[in-house]
Amino acid sequence: MNTFHPSILKTYDIRGIYQETLHDEDAYRWGYLFTQYLKLEKPKSPPKIAVGYDTRKSSPNLKKAMIEGIVDAGGYAIDIGMGPTPYLYNATKTLRTQGGIMITGSHNPSNYNGFKTLTSSGPVSGELIQKIASMPLSEKGDPGKSKKDEFYGRYLLEVMMNASLMPFSGMPIVWDCGNGAMGIIIDLFAEVYGGPDHIALFTEPNGDFPNHHPDPSKSENYTALLRKMQEVSARVGFMFDGDGDRMGIVLDGKILLPDQIIAVLALDYLYHFAEQFGNKIIVDVKASASLVDILESSGAEVVFSPCGHSLIKEKMKKQKIGFAGETSGHIFYKHNHNFDDGLLAAFTFLRLLINSPTLIEHVLKKWKKNHLSPEIRIPFDDQTKDTLFKNLEKEISKLNMTVLKIDGIRALNDDGWFLIRASNTEPQLSMRVEGHTQETYEKLCRTLETVLSNSGNPIDILSILTKKDPL
């Protein structure tokens, strides 16, 4: 195979269906080309590249081919074993590598897989993915080498230190890993700090995800967690996605909104780090007005970002911002090298629940009961994107609304706002609506329907929302 299937080269990573659009040969080629790229950037010594992989059945084969590609290109591959994506991120700093590749399908169905890649200076995304993928393979020279270096205990301790967590709470806490890669770390955590406090669910690696799909953005995936919490009288429970860079929280029997989790962790950040790193907080364009109001009323300067973990990390680095939250569930900290880590976010929330519960109570009490839709995703022809958004912009310009064009179109007025953007990972339109009352919410939904219809895309938004998951 001489080229990659064009559908797998995404904005943030490489991702496709195993043995259909993504093959072992692609892993070999990407490992070879990434090593080749690093050698061109710093030709004096063979680049060190950490390689990790998640629990999917295809991951060991892809990992083996990836390492072969790195070695054949003259690189030094360090196999850190199976684990979550943040463990791979941490390895690039701990082992002082020039790069890292995580083999993961994240929260996609079990037949998907892919590669998240980073250099010592940041994530590989967008144009850089295209640039590396289009490079011709250089002739083989002297081969490199590979070794194994697993360090789960070091990673766990560093996350606990970054969260300032003393894990002995005296109350039961439930951890749902969904048979994903964070289960390895939670098993270790429960073993060392277990007793009656920490109850771990579905930690055994299984790429078929037999208990539920590891996606904390869907409420149906919380059934087992809610049941176990009720059984052991636990106030709090955590759920991780398949590769552990996102998490969800159940508190007192209720699934928290991602926006609420961001608000709690952002206020904690402002208290501890604003003096050192400043008061700017990044949120993505899907963030609710309730989140923005709480942050601004607490002294934060809110900075909107396009969606996508790579783009947010880039913005954090360029603007020297210390905290970011994405409504998909990613939480980023400057003191964690701008990495998103579901375990660090969970440990930080747990520390607050144990030591500073009034902060959490403050956020939930102050939370405005606006009417906020879940994310609405509609398939569309990606080839028509430019024309579609020109038409949408023309239609929205006829309305008396303020327009934010950071990522798609976010249109605001006194009633609330709506967002239309193109997904960077799938050929889909992504939309969200928020109104201050039920009446203004429905009014904005009808306005969005009119805008879409006049742009050649008649969609019954309200009918879709009556069937949508509340998260």
Image (cartoon, rainbow, N blue to C red):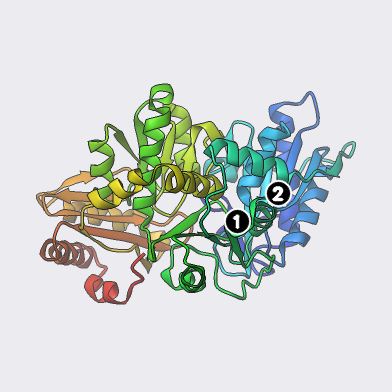
Q: Position of residue 452 (x, y in %)?
A: 23, 64
Residue 12, visible in the rendered structure: no
Q: Does residue 41 sit above or below 351 in this rendering?
A: above
Q: Position of residue 68 (x, y in %)?
A: 83, 50
- Image point (22%, 57%), residue name: 434
The dot on residue 243 is 1
Q: Position of residue 60 (x, y in %)?
A: 76, 60
Residue under circle 2? 30
Mark 1, Cα crowd under 10 Å, few <14 / some 14-19 / many 20+, is many
In the displayed structure, does residue 402 sit left or right of residue 44? left
The amino acid on which the numbered mark 1 sits, given as a three-letter code, is Asp
- Image point (62%, 56%), residue name: 182
Q: Position of residue 128 (x, y in %)?
A: 57, 40
Q: In the picture, residue 153 is in which quadrant?
A: top right
Q: Residue furthest right?
A: 142
Where is the C terminus found, in terms of image quarters? bottom left
The amino acid on which the numbered mark 2 sits, given as a three-letter code, is Trp
Nearest to N terminus: mark 1 or mark 2: 2
3D distance between C-alphas at marks 1 and 2: 20 Å
Foreground tag (1 vs 2): 1
